[in-house]
Structure formats: structure tokens, C-alpha cells
Image (spheres, helix red, strand yellow):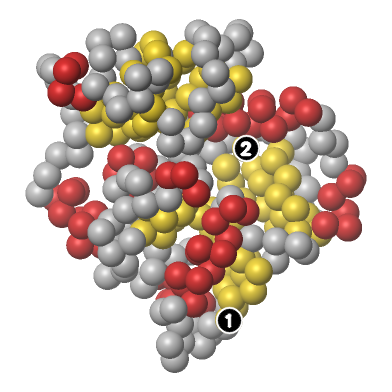
């Protein structure tokens, strides 16, 4: 969890992330991508404009150093300070329909919420072993991608469906990676997209692992969780256009997980 504070906090993030940040009202949230100059996603951030001059960003702990280092390079003369709050707060997931908790800062997360709770108070929330797995399964069902160390800079933004989740604003000004992302949007067709799949058996799939469909198409795992019915549910990226020759997309790993699907997502993929 990083805090961006100062008179230029939103303007600074507007020039670095793919989402519309400056127009966020206090209390509003959005997903946003931090991208390389080649348009590849370094990290996916959940943003909360917590005050007029403060934005909080939540993303996987393992990418904290990478994200902070990249963003600090571009501060220059901007009046913004970056503070790592990871030790001060815990990120607590609240299921859909749970009672409101107005005393804590919170972000929308699909039909659920994420609370930002001071570490000293985190013990007030239950932490059963199955809760993390249930949360991951809900994310997968919702088609919500995530980027980890193994997949950072592996995918162009649209491959992760960030354009379908409100994490890219095509009518805003320049930001890092904008030229490549805009070109894919306006001039080309994104041939590889994130979809939902199921594997009936196999070793636990990890982010960055290879998988394959029944017709031989190659996939790259984005995230996975143990299914309640056995096996694994996962989000993976591969060619989704019809008529692709299986032999042209054979996975590089001979022991790649075999999956069935794609399964429905709550949002449509472009034709």
C-alpha cells in the first residue's frame, strides 16, 4: 500500500497510470495500470482518492519495491510525496452483502469491498484459512486479473482486459506506455485476451505457468485457485479468435496443464 500526497498527487498519477485519476472524487476508487514504455503492465493498482491531496494505491506486496522505484523516477519537480504504508495497514476483503464499516477507508472491488485497516486493529477481523481461497475464486469468477513478479511486464494492457474493467482511459493525456496501448485500441485487434478456465486435475498452477486447451492452444496462467468442486479455476491469456491453428500456438512447456473452457465472464470480450 502506497500513499501519494501533495498538491500534485493526482496530476502526477494522471501522467503515470492508465486510468483517469484527476477526475476521481474524494472517496472514489478505480483500477489502474502502471505500464512500461512498451505498453506492458508492470502492476495493477486499486486506487482510492482518500482526500483532495491524497491517493492510496493497493497492489501485491511483492511488487512494492518495483512500483515505488519506477514512480519515484518521474517525480522531478512535482509536489508529491510517496510513502509506503504496508507495515501500517492491512488489506481486508469484505464479502458482498456484508455490513458497512464506515470507520475504515475502503475500495470497491467488483461487488465486494476492500477495507484498509490499521495493523493494530486487523485482529478484529476473522482470518480463516479458506477465506483467501474463496476471495481468489470470486476474483476469478469476476474476471479480475492481477500481476505478480512472474508476470510483470509479460502482457500488454488489453491482454489483461484492463480496457474492459475501466482501468484505461483512452480520452486522457499521455502516460507511460500510452502510445502502444492506444495503437492497439484504435488501429489493431487484440488477438490474445484473458479468459476463465478450469483444470480438473494437475499440480497447482502458478502465475506465469503454461496451460493448453483441448484443441492445443497455448495459454499463460495469470492467477488460479483451488475449485470448490475439485481441480483448479484459473484466469489465463491466450488467442481467443476462432480458427487458430493449434500447432501454431503449442505451449513451450511439455507438461502444461490441460484446461476446459472458456467459461463465462461477467463482461463480454470484443468481437
Question: How far apart are the two marked residues, 2 and 1, measured between alpha carbons?
Answer: 30 Å
| Residue at disc 1, secondary structure | strand
Occupied quadrant, residue 250: top left
**Which residue is at a point 20% across and 57% down the rendered structure image?**
180
The extreme left residue here reads 187
Residue 269, visible in the rendered structure: no
Residue 39 image label: none
Looking at the image, is 85 positioned above or below residue 127? below
Residue 15, visible in the rendered structure: yes
Q: Nearer the viewer, mark 2 or mark 1?
A: 1
Q: Position of residue 158 (x, y in %)?
A: 29, 44
78 sits to left or right of 180: right
Observer-nearest residue: 267 or 179?
A: 179
Residue that label 2 marks: 112
Residue that label 1 marks: 81
**Which residue is at a point 65% across and 43% down the rendered structure image?**
113
251 sits to left or right of 119: left
Q: Position of residue 24 (x, y in %)?
A: 48, 64
Q: Quadrant of the N terminus?
A: bottom right
Looking at the image, is 244 positioned above or below residue 166? above
| Residue at disc 2, secondary structure | strand
Occupied quadrant, residue 193: top left
Looking at the image, is 41 positioned above or below residue 15? above
Occupied quadrant, residue 227: top right
Q: Residues within 10 Å of mark 2 (few under 14, many from 20)?
A: some
Amino acid at each position: 500500500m502506497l500513499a501519494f500526497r501533495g498538491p500534485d498527487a493526482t496530476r502526477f498519477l494522471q501522467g503515470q497510470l492508465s486510468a483517469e485519476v484527476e477526475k476521481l472524487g474524494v472517496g472514489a476508487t478505480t483500477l489502474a495500470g502502471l505500464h512500461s514504455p512498451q505498453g506492458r503492465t508492470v502492476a495493477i493498482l486499486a486506487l482510492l482518492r482518500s482526500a483532495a491531496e491524497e491517493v492510496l494505491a493497493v497492489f501485491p506486496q511483492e511488487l512494492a519495491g518495483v512500483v515505488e522505484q519506477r514512480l519515484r523516477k518521474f517525480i522531478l519537480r512535482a509536489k508529491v510525496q510517496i510513502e509506503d504504508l504496508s507495515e501500517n495497514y492491512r488489506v481486508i476483503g469484505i464479502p458482498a452483502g456484508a455490513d458497512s464499516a464506515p470507520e475504515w477507508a475502503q475500495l470497491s472491488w467488483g461487488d465486494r469491498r476492500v477495507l484498509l485497516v490499521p495493523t493494530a486493529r486487523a485482529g478484529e477481523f476473522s482470518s480463516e484459512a479458506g477465506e483467501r481461497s474463496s476471495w481468489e475464486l470470486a476474483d476469478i469468477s469476476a474476471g479480475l486479473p492481477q500481476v505478480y513478479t512472474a508476470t510483470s511486464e509479460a502482457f500488454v494492457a488489453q491482454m489483461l482486459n484492463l480496457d474492459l474493467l475501466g482501468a484505461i482511459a483512452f480520452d486522457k493525456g499521455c502516460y507511460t506506455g500510452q502510445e502502444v496501448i492506444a495503437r492497439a485500441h484504435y488501429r489493431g485487434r487484440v488477438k490474445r485476451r484473458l479468459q476463465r478456465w478450469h483444470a480438473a486435475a494437475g499440480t497447482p498452477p502458478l502465475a506465469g505457468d503454461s496451460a493448453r486447451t483441448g484443441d492445443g492452444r497455448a495459454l499463460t496462467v495469470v492467477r488460479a485457485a483451488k475449485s470448490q468442486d475439485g481441480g483448479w479455476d484459473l484466469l489465463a491469456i491466450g488467442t481467443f479468435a476462432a480458427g487458430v491453428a493449434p500447432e501454431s500456438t503449442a505451449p513451450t512447456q511439455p507438461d502444461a496443464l490441460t484446461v476446459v473452457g472458456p467459461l463465462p465472464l461477467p463482461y463480454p470480450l470484443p468481437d
